[in-house]
Amino acid sequence: MPGFSYVAIPPGSEDMRQVYFPFPVSQLNDLDFIRALRGELGKEAFAIEGLRSKLLEELATSSTTRSCGVAKANGEKEKVRENLQKIDDEHLELLMSMEAFQVEMLRDPSKDVGRKGVFLYHEGRADGPVNDRAMNLCLAAGFPPKELRGTCFLSRTEEFVERDSVDPIWRRCDFTLKDCSNDAEWLKDARRDREESGLKQKEDAEWFSSLEDCQAPMAEGKSDLYAWKQTEEEVDIVFDPGPFAGIRATKKDIAVKFSRRSLFVRLRGRILCPDVELAAEVDPENSFWTFDRDRMELQVTLSKTPAGTMWRSLLKVS
């Protein structure tokens, strides 16, 4: 039986990668796939017996302050200890591996209606570069804004019924780079389903309500060539000074062109922005650029239209 493809989406401008996993995977052996994701992130393999001993030691030394009393608390600890001893090595490794990931179900699988599921895996990091492309895919699927950082992975599943069985189980199937396009059919279907069920409106309202008590930070990002941030009115892009300092650049060496949905930047014969498509519209008449020769710093300021639009990324996800 053949394997399947999944997609790795790095933060920044590094190319998205379609990865082929050469073996079939279902919910019965999903640890094989999770190990592959750990390997992609450079995570070391677990030493299971050492991990089990550590968990038992932590359980033995942990303090419990329950109103139900010491005897009952100790009894609960003993049940946990017994269950921990019963878990086999693979299930324990899968449990601990999944603590390293957060999983977003962008679409749930259903054999009854022939619907395949789509799942996004990320580390749930509070630091590291923002993953604009993964965030935009979630938005296109009808989810409220959520900050994602670091490399994200997308995988698809489908339900099937094994021979001599009644209840369906799932297996992983192909998810490709083509499926990462903002006009992919599964994205349109996921958004429509969430809108028709009322779930999108409900979660959007909850997200906007959460902003009343806590101002959500506006998205920003960084690549090898530039960093960008935004206000309610503008998007500022500051280019790395290295290329400019290397040729002792002046304003005459720089060409910047704006349109409503694109930006082009050239430094002599080097293209820094190859007519890239922006995530939203800007006002070219009120956009401008400056070059500080002392610091060799080129700053491009894009005027948002309309003002107040929150960009989730600088560039449109293709």
Image (cartoon, rainbow, N blue to C red):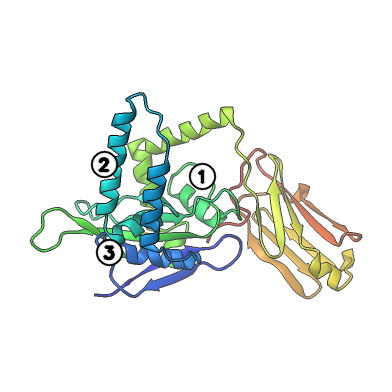
For badge 1, the amino acid type reads: Lys
Horizontal side of residue 87 vs 61, given as left or right: left
Of pointers 2 and 1, the one earlier in the residue sequence: 2
Of pointers 3 and 2, the one earlier in the residue sequence: 3
In the image, which disc is placed on residue 301? none
> What residue sits right under mark 2 in the picture?
79
> Which structural element holds mark 3?
loop
Residue drawn 43% across the image and 45% down it: 142
Q: Is residue 178 visible?
A: no
> What residue sits right under mark 1 in the picture?
146
For badge 2, the amino acid type reads: Lys
> Which structural element holds mark 1?
loop
Instruction: Tell which tag, 2 or 1, sits nearer the viewer.
Output: 2
Mark pair 3, 1: CA separation: 30 Å
In x, y percent, where is residue 303?
72, 46
Residue 85 in the image: above or below residue 30 = above
Q: Residues within 10 Å of mark 2 (few under 14, many from 20)?
A: few
Q: Nearer the viewer, residue 44 or 155?
A: 44
> What residue sits right under mark 3 in the picture?
29
In x, y percent, where is residue 268?
81, 73
Residue drawn 79% across the image and 55% down it: 299
Of pointers 3 and 1, the one earlier in the residue sequence: 3
